[in-house]
Image (spheres, grey):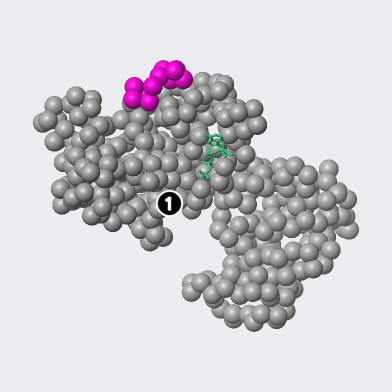
Amino acid sequence: MAYVELKSVTKKFDSAVTAVDNSSFIINDKEFVVLVGPSGCGKSTTLRMIAGLDTVTEGEIYIDDMLVNDIPPKDRDIAMVFQNYALYPHMTVYQNMAFGLKLRKFTKKEIDARVREAAEILEIENLLDRKPKALSGGQRQRVAVGRAIVRKPKVFLFDEPLSNLDAKLRVQMRTEISKLHQRLETTMIYVTHDQMEAMTMGDRIVIMKDGLVHQIDSPLNLYHTPKNQFVAGFIGSPSMNFITGKLTFENGFVFDEGTFRLEIPIKYRVALQDHLNKKIVLGIRPENINNNMKSSRESHSSLLKFHVDVVELMGNEIFVYLKTKYHLLIARMKPENIPNVGEEIEVMFDLQKLYFFDANIGDILFNRVDWTECN
Ligand code: ATP
């Protein structure tokens, strides 16, 4: 059993930089948790404090009931995989993987058994005699993971381990790390700036910005019920559209963008009533603006006309950029009836899947959790 708990953890590098600001969360035993956020949000610093490579300015970190603030990294029973792999260039793959165990005075026999077991898991048995310079990026990455596996640590920490690999290899390695997690059944904490990696790998995701934790939840809950505009915009690709407008009343609530108006279903009314005649931000995901006119007549959706600014052909789908005087919206559509740039087209907004945010602080006013409560 190995859980990790952060209690009100703050890291200040000097009085000017607060890299991590009062973070509190628990990573459960055997859980795969991803720390994600834009560059500089404090995710690596959080990981480095758990590893013991950075000191904690305020707060407490526990690994399995043990307060580790003052415990040196080597005594925390964790293993870390870095972005740059940090392999010893003069040692073979075998020696690289064996090195940590040798320092810890394991017997030759135990070292050999562990190295060969890890090599088998990672399918690098045929590379054991090679030096790192004779390996591809993906192979080096595996060796770095192997070096962590042989330790049989309580917790694995990964700091952007795939960011030096090309896109295809990254996808392959990400499934391999997920499989490794299932096989080893060990607690894993993984840092990345890539929301796709976070969504596909994490049991839960911690979303950070400017040193603050914005939301901790499962990938699907983050997608469907973001707490604020930052989370809503960070999760999902292409990002959610944010449209600033005014909420007015004419026989019902109407969202007025300035160049188009949208009648808002009555179910949103309770959540939005305090914002009547105020500026408000409407959020809609690109996949909820589309060109399927048949279903628009059958469902709760609203037809609108826009000029096409750009069309990106992805093969299985198209991204259509729609222009208003005030906004550029992205719609993710089926590759049928591909529109021309400059053409005016009719699209539908799925009114079941609207989000509303406070225009000043970005907090969600209505999301799909509210929706089910209202139904
Ligand atoms: P990236 O994805 O770019 O690695 P990150 O989210 O991992 O970013 P951190 O490396 O944790 O971010 O950095 C958080 C903040 O702390 C940044 O503003 C960074 O400049 C600052 N910082 C990190 N290390 C130090 C240091 N040793 N001294 C001073 N400031 C630092």
Which residue shows up at 56% across the image and 78% down it? 336
Farthest residue to the front: give it: 90
Instruction: Categorize mark 1 by other alpha carbons within 10 Å: few (<14), some (14-19), many (20+).
Output: some
Q: Which residue is mark 1?
A: 163
Between 15 and 367, which is closer to the camera in this rendering? 15
User: What secondary structure is the magenta-colored segment mainly?
Assistant: loop
Q: Nearer the viewer, residue 106 or 181?
A: 106
**270 over 71 or under it: above or below:** below
**Relative horizontal placement of residue 369, taking residue 149 as reference (left or right):** right
Which corner quadrant of the image does residue 64 belong to?
Answer: top left
Q: Secondary structure at mark 1?
A: loop
Residue 318 lies, with reference to residue 365, above or below; the image says below
The kind of residue tagged 1 is: Ser
Whether residue 65 appears in magenta in the rendering, the answer is yes
* Residue 321 locus on image (x, y percent): 65, 70
Could you tell me which residue is drawn at 15 percent across and 48 percent down?
A: 129
- In the rendered structure, the answer to whether residue 110 lies left or right of residue 234 reads left
Q: Is residue 82 left or right of residue 332?
A: left
On whether residue 316 falls in the magenta region, the answer is: no
Magenta extent: 64-76
